[in-house]
Amino acid sequence: MALITLSVDGESHTFDAEPDMPLLYALRDHLALKNPRFGCGLAQCGACTVLMDGQPIRSCVMPVAAVTGELTTLGGLAVNGTPHVVQQAFIDEQVPFCGYCVSGWVLYAVALLERDPAPSDEAIRAAFAGLKCRCGAHSAILRAVNRAAGELQRA
Amino acid sequence: MEFDATVSRRDVLKGSGALVVAVVAPRALSQAPAGDGQQGPFWRELSPAQLDTYLAIDEQGLVTAYFGKMDMGQGVDLSIAQIVAEELHMALDDVAVVMGDTALTVNQGGASGSTGLEQGAKPLRNAAAEARRVLSELGARHLGLLMSQVGSQGGAVYALDDPTQRVSYGELLGGQHFDVKLEWNGRFGNTLDARGRETPKPSSIYETVGKPFQRRDLPGIVMGTRDYIVDVRLPGMLHGRVVRPPVAGSVPANFDSDSIAHIPGARVVHEGDYLGVVAEREWDAIKAARELDVTWTDVDAPFPEMASLYDHIREAPVVRESAGGGRAADVAPDLESFDAALARANRVIEAEYEFPFQSHASMAPACAVCDFRGDHAILWTGSQKPHYAAQGVAQLLGLPVENVRGIWVPGPGSYGRNDAGDAAMDAALMSKAAGRPVRVQGMRDEGSGWDPKGPASIHHVRASFDAAGNVTAYCFRSKGFSAGDTESNESNPSHTYAGMLTGWPDASVQRFNNPGDRYEFPNKVQYWQTIAPLLGRASPLRTAHLRDPLGPQIHFASESFVDEMAHAVNTDPIEFRLRYLEEQRDADVLRAAAERYAWQPRVAATREIRSGDVATGRGVAYTRRNNSVVAVIAEVDVNLRTGRVWPRRFVVAADQGIVVNPLWLRRTLEGNVIHGMSRTLHEEVRFSRERVTSIDWLSYPILEMADAPEEIDIVLVNRPELPPYGAGEPSTRTITPAIANAIFDATGVRLRRAPFTAERMLEALEAAAT
Ligand code: FES
Ligand code: FES
C-alpha cells in the first residue's frame, strides 16, 4: 500500500492504494467517479480514457502511482456547466447510442482539435485509431468532430 | 449512484408532488390498490387492464408514461413520448417516459425483435387516447359544457367557441388516479395490448409524431452525468468475479481457498459446479479470480478444429427440420414439386454459403448488482429484458416472482441475448452466498469469450430456369446451430451460465428461420435444419439471439444467390428482383434505392478500376423482416493487391411504416449499417479444440474509424397510412449481401464465406486468377 494523491477535475484526493493498481480503479472505486469506464482493461477500446495534462491516456493500464499530471474526466470538461465545444457537437449531432464508449471519442477529439483545429478527414480517422464503438456511431462522430472544428474556426 | 430500494411507484408519484387518490372512488394511499395482484414486499402487480398502469398526471399537468419495453439507445422511449404527447395534445417536453423497472411498468417484453414501436406503442397510444377522452369529459363538466363543445390543446381542455375558457389536465386530474378500465388482450410480453373506448387520432392530423426530436438522455451521456449499470453502488456492496474453466466443459474438482487468503476480504463462492469470488474492492476481486488455485476436471476437448467448422455442420445429424417458423410446429418441406421442376429444367445453378459464430462483444463485459435479503431481492441489470431477468433471478433464488424487483440501468450496449442475462444470475447467486449486495462485472475475455453467440450456419441454394431464362424452381436450405440453444430471455435459469452449473435442467430449444423475402418463384421451397450444440452445458459457444437473429446469415446467402441467379440469365440484379416481387412496398423500396443511387443497369461484373490497385463495384440487396422492408446499395472498393474491402458508400431505402421520428430512425439505420459492416468485414469467433480464443479486441476485431464509410445516404419511404414497424434490427441483414454483391461487381469474384477479411479476399482473387 502507498499513499496516493491525484488531482482530478480540479480537486485533489489522497488515499491508500496499491501502487500498481490501474488508475481506472482508483477513479471508480476509491473516488466513486463514474466517467472513465471499464471496457477492456487492455488499452484496446478507450472507454476508460481520461486526459492527463491535456493528453488522452487509458486509465485501465496506467498504474495509479505512475500518474504525474492533472487529470480531466469527461465529467470535468464543462466549464461552469457550459459543455465543451466537442460535447456540444456530440449533442447537436446526436452521436451516442448506448454511449458507453463516449469518454474515449470526446476526449480524443478534444486533444485532436487542441493540436489541429482544422483536421483533415484522414487526420480525424487516424486520431481515433484504437477506439471502439460497438453500436456503430462512427459516421455521427465524424460529423460531430467536423462540426466542432467549424465552431472553433468561427470562434 | 446510490439507491433507496424501498421506492415504489406510489412513492414516485408522491415524490413528484402528486397525491394519488382515486377520481371515482376515493382511496387513501394507505389502502391496498384496487383490484388484482398480490402484494410483494415493495411493489404491486400492475394491471394491464388499468389506464393508471400506463399513464400518470401530476399537479403541474406533467405526464409520465410507463413503458414496459426498452430503449437500447435508439430513441424508442422518445418515440413513445411523442406518441403519448400526440394523443394527449401536449407538448413533448411535458411527457416523461419511465421504463425498465418491474415495480413501475408492466411486462411488455423488454427490448425484443424490434417491436418497441410496432407492438410496444400500441397500448400506450390507446391509453393516451382514452386518457384524452376522460380528461375531455372531466373538462367539459368543469366548464359546464357538453363533450361536443370542448377540445383539448397544450395539456388543457378548452371551450371550442371561447378558447380562453380552459382548464388544465393538472387541475382536472393532477395527482389522482384515472381509475379507468381498459380492455386487455390477456397477454404479457411483446403482444400485450389494451384499449379504451376512444380511438387514437388519424395520422393525417399528427403534429408531434413525424418530427425529428432529439433524445433527451443524450446530454447526460455526453456530459458524463448519466448513470450506467457499472455505476450502481450500494452500502456494504461486494465485488464479484466468475472463475471460468481453462477448457470449456471442465468443472472445479478442487480449489484452495488459502491461495487467496492474502487478498483482503476475498472469499470463494462455490455452488454445484459454479465458482466465483467476492471481495470488498473491485481490484481485489479481480486478483482473487486470477489467483485462486483451482484443479479442474479432465475433459475431452469439446470442439472441432475451427478450420473444419463448416464440415462439421455439413456432416452433423439433423436434430430438427422445418419449412416453417422456428417457434411454430414443424412443416415438412415440399421437395417433390421442386425436384420435378428441376428435372425438367433447362439450366440449374447452385451455391453454398457459410457464416461464422459471432459474438455480441458489447462495449464492455456485462455488469449486474443484486441485493438478496432473504425473503426478497432487488436486481439492477443491463439486460434488455429486465422483467424476464427478474423472473429468472426469482427462480434461481427460490423466491416468489413478486418478491424480486428488477431495475434496468443502461449498460454497455445490447444487441440481443448477450452476457447481461448471465451477469444478472451471477450477481444473484453471489449475493445469496455472501449475504451482502454483490456487483459482478466480467473482464474483457468474458465479453466475447463467454457470451452466447450468433449461430454459425451453412446455406445451400439451388435454382432452375427454362430456356427463356425464367425461374422454374427454387430451393433454399439452411443448416446450422439453433438460435434458441440459449433462449432470448433469461426468465428460466436453465438458459444462463450460473443456472447450467448449479443443476438447472437442460431447456435448450431447436430453432432456425427462413429468408424473409417475397419473391414469387414457382416451386419455391425454403427450409432449415438445426444440429446439436458442440457442448451441451455452460458452453462458450452457446448460441442465441444476436441483432437481427439469423438475419445476416440467411440473407447473406439468399440475396447473394438472387444476384447469382440474375447474373446467370444476363439480367440486371434490380430488374431481376423486380420481376419476381409483386408487393408494392417491396418494389417501391428497391426503386427508391436505385433512384437515389442513380443505379446503372448491368448484366455482368463491371470490374471498374477506381485508381491504381483499387477496383470498385456496386451491389444491391433487398430484405424483409416481418413488416419492415429495406433495400441497400453498397459501393465497395476492393484493393486487388492487399485484399482490403472498403464499403465507402451506402444508400439505404427503408419502409418502416409511418415515420415517428425521422432523426432517430435515420440514426438507428446508420448504426445498423455500421454494425452490419463490422460483422461482414471482420467478425468471426475463433476457437481452439478446447476453448474460445476470441478474448479481446485483437482476437475479435471489429470495425474501427478507418473503415467507417464516407457516406450513408438514407431514404425514408414514409407510410403514414401504416403503423410504425420495427427498425432496430431489420436493415442489419441487408448489409452483408449488398457488400458481397458489390465485391462481385468490382472483381468478378463471389465470396461465399463471411467475414470478408483482407486475407480471404486476397485468397479468392488469387484462386480466381489461376
Ligand atoms: S478499458 Fe481501457 S482501453 Fe478499454
Ligand atoms: S454508443 Fe454504444 S458503444 Fe458507442
Image (cartoon, coloured by chain):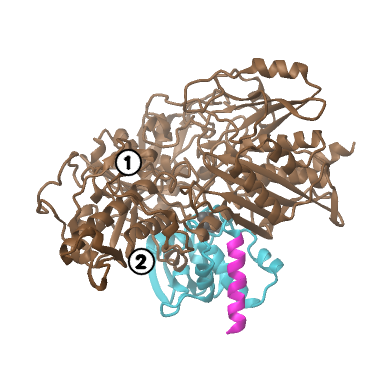
Chain colours: A cyan, B brown
Name the residue: 62% across, 29% down: B689
Is there any visible trace of residue B173 in the rendered image? no
Give the chain letter at badge 1: B
Magenta segment, prevailing SS (helix, strand or loop): helix
**Dot 2 alpha-carbon crowd within 10 angstroms: few under 14, some 14 to 19, many 20 or more:** some
Name the quadrant of the C terminus of chain A: bottom right
Against B15, residue B678 (above or below) is: above
Three-letter amino acid code at disc 2?
Ala
Of B416 and B609, the residue lying toward us: B609
Give the chain letter at badge 2: B
Tell me whether marks 2 and 1 sit on the same chain.
Answer: yes
Instruction: Give the magenta part as a residue range.
Output: A139-155
Name the quadrant of the N terminus of chain A: bottom left
Farthest right residue? B770
Query: Which picture quadrant has residue B171?
Result: bottom left
Of B711 and A70, the residue lying toward us: B711
In the image, is A47 to the left or to the right of B603? Answer: left
